[in-house]
Amino acid sequence: MAGLPFDDASAPLYSVGQVAEMLQVQQSFLRRLDEHEVVRPRRSAGGQRRYSREEVHRVRYVVRLVDEGMTLIAIRHILELERRVAELERERDEALRRLADLESRTRADGRRGPAA
């Protein structure tokens, strides 16, 4: 059973109508999010928008921000900044792993004594 599309949070499973019903928003709102590049779902072979579970969660987050009075331009900027922060955190984590590896090798080399 593992490996089915519904197991993959990024699989494009839901139509505009389904997402609109799930989140109690207008379909036109979802189309506007796509047009303003706030949430850009993939398209089916027939050109229909298909949302993944990740995108549904992102739309839910956007709805909350809109309800708090934020504009779509501001929300797009926030989402871009959040993506950049996540990217920088991944880079930092990788650098820390590499540093720990180097320190570990340096300690191991030090225990072997000076090279002859």
Image: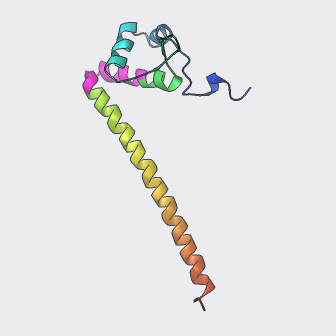
Residue drawn at point x = 39 percent, y = 48 percent: 88
- Image quarter (top left, top right, bottom left or bottom right) of the N terminus: top right
Q: Residue furthest front?
A: 45
Relative to residue 109, is residue 11 depicted above or below? above
**Most prominent secondary structure in the magenta stretch?**
helix
Most foreground residue, 31 or 29: 31
Q: Where is residue 36 in the image (x, y as percent from the top left)?
A: 31, 20
Q: Position of residue 68 (x, y in %)?
A: 28, 22
Residue drawn at point x = 31 percent, y = 33 percent: 78
Residue 63 part of the magenta segment: yes
Residue 10 part of the magenta segment: no
- Quarter of the image where one finds residue 11: top right
Relative to residue 16, is residue 51 depicted above or below? below
Most foreground residue, 107 or 44: 44
- Quarter of the image where one finds residue 34: top left
Relative to residue 2, is residue 101 depicted above or below? below
Whether residue 80 can be seen here: yes
Q: How many numbered marks appear?
A: 0
> From the viewer's perspective, is 26 left or right of 42?
left
- Image quarter (top left, top right, bottom left or bottom right) of the C terminus: bottom right
Most foreground residue, 65 or 108: 108
Most foreground residue, 63 or 11: 11
Q: What stretch is highlighted in magenta?
A: 59-73
Q: Residue furthest right?
A: 1
Residue drawn at point x = 43 percent, y = 25 percent: 58
Q: Where is residue 97 in the image (x, y as percent from the top left)?
A: 51, 59
> From the viewer's perspective, is 98 left or right of 26?
right
Whether residue 26 can be seen here: no
